[in-house]
Amino acid sequence: MGGSGNKLRGWLPWAALACLVVPMFASYYFDDIFSSISFIFDSAEGNALGWDQAKYGVYTSAYSVLCIFGGLVLGGILLDKWGVRIAGSFFVVMMAAGAALVLFALLTGGNHSLDLAYAGGMFFGLGSEIAGTAVNRSIAKWFKGGPLALAMGLQLAIARLGTAFAMVLAPKLVAQQTGHVYNLVECARPALAGMGLMAFGLILWAVFVAIDRKAAEAPSGAFARTGLRSNAEEGASAADGSARTGLRSNAEDKDKFVLKDVLGVLGNKNFWLLGLLCVLFYSAIIAFKKFAGAILVPRFDIPAQTAGWMISMLPFSTVIFAPLFGLMVDRFGNGTRWMIAGSVLALAAHLLLAFAPQGVPAFGYLAMVLLGFGYSLVPAALWPSATKIVPEKVLGTTFALLFWVQNLGLFSFKVLAGKILAAGAGAGESAAAVSVEQMFVGLCVAAVLLAFIFARTSRLHPELRLDAPSRSSE
């Protein structure tokens, strides 16, 4: 029996991780179904939906609406109070339902297609963000005291493969044709493929819930290294304490989540430093991806399929480098330095995209390489750092609040990018692309400054161990 327990300790966390990454893969794919084919929205007359770049920008902003107006905070609290098995399941289903509504809007079209897609995008966005929070919280629990940054890096890498899949597949499903009016079926094809992925993700999420429940209910010895305490163990401990004192133990009071803990997170200076860095950095990446086709095609005189492959270098690079950098953070620490380096690389990439010579694709590929490195470096250090600045009992709330702050920025910059591109259309597509890239350059400059400030905080407060290795000393 002891040998069996050791075997479970080895593979069970990785089995749980394998189930967790598939819903996130589907989420990343669906979120980027139009990123490499945004050319279909160059004019409202060019597609049966009647959307132009400004309307497309409004649609992309729907992802963040419910997140901004309290949904993320509420979802994070529910995760901490109800756990990932109940609350996480609710939001994973919400994610799939929102995607289904977007697909329905794309297939039916009509005057209200944008309204329906916007509503679907709102539900999809909130479901995706809380599902991501549940995944991060689960990984933090299953890999506590172990290769946490590596596990988070692997999850991030595989999820971003969903983006790569969207970038490569969408131009094949919707071929670029000059003067062609894209019909409803063509517009909906990438979303239809996404629903298939969602269905598979729902199945594996159910498998994860079963694994998580089994681990929590099993004798503690068999799953000691998963970071999960069995229900029996917790119940026995509570009963023993109550029998002897008639009162709840101090440890139980300390670990119980209460609403005032949210104020504690919001009053944490380090939370805001991390949150603002998250806003600036991710806006320079994610908002860019939404309009990448409309930027890269005119800037480097390339067809849409080439642009799709060029953009796909971002997520493909993270497949290798996100786990690698996560492993380095686990073993060697120096997380704040990785954040600085990643932000500088993102800045260099956007400077190339904005000011490199027109019509030279090599500069586009170089920019994607730099952006891919940055997109791996910063998250590999940023998300494990979040586990070090707050108590574990509010970790779900903290992740949710970070996503909330992030979505405030994403909402604004997606809308702004769409308006910049639409307003600059009269001056030429390349000029409009340069204008929106200047906005991304500004975001990266601010991200670099914040990364330096966070590194200074690490030096002034060594007790937080922000630059310490993530692995336990055991």
Image (cartoon, rainbow, N blue to C red):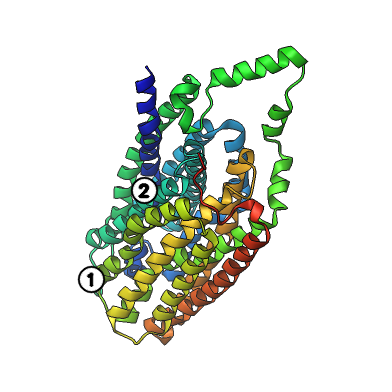
Mark 2 element type: helix
Asked if residue 446 lies left or right of residue 105, the reply is right
Which quarter of the rendering shows the N terminus?
Answer: top left
Residue ID at (58%, 31%): 82
Q: Is residue 161 visible?
A: yes
| Residue closest to the far top | 243
Residue 343 lies, with reference to residue 29, above or below; the image says below
Q: Determine which quarter of the picture holds residue 445.
A: bottom right
Query: Residue 86: x, y in percent?
Result: 52, 31
Residue ID at (60%, 52%): 465
Residue 418 lies, with reference to residue 167, above or below; the image says below
Query: Residue 79: x, y in percent?
Result: 57, 37
Disc 2 + disc 1, Cβ < 8 Å:
no
Query: Residue 352: x, y in percent?
Result: 40, 80
Query: Residue 359: x, y in percent?
Result: 29, 84
Residue type at tag 2: Phe
Mark 1 element type: loop
Q: Which residue is mark 2?
A: 25
Tag 1 or tag 2, which sits nearer the N-term? 2
Residue 177, label in figure? 1
Residue type at tag 1: Gln
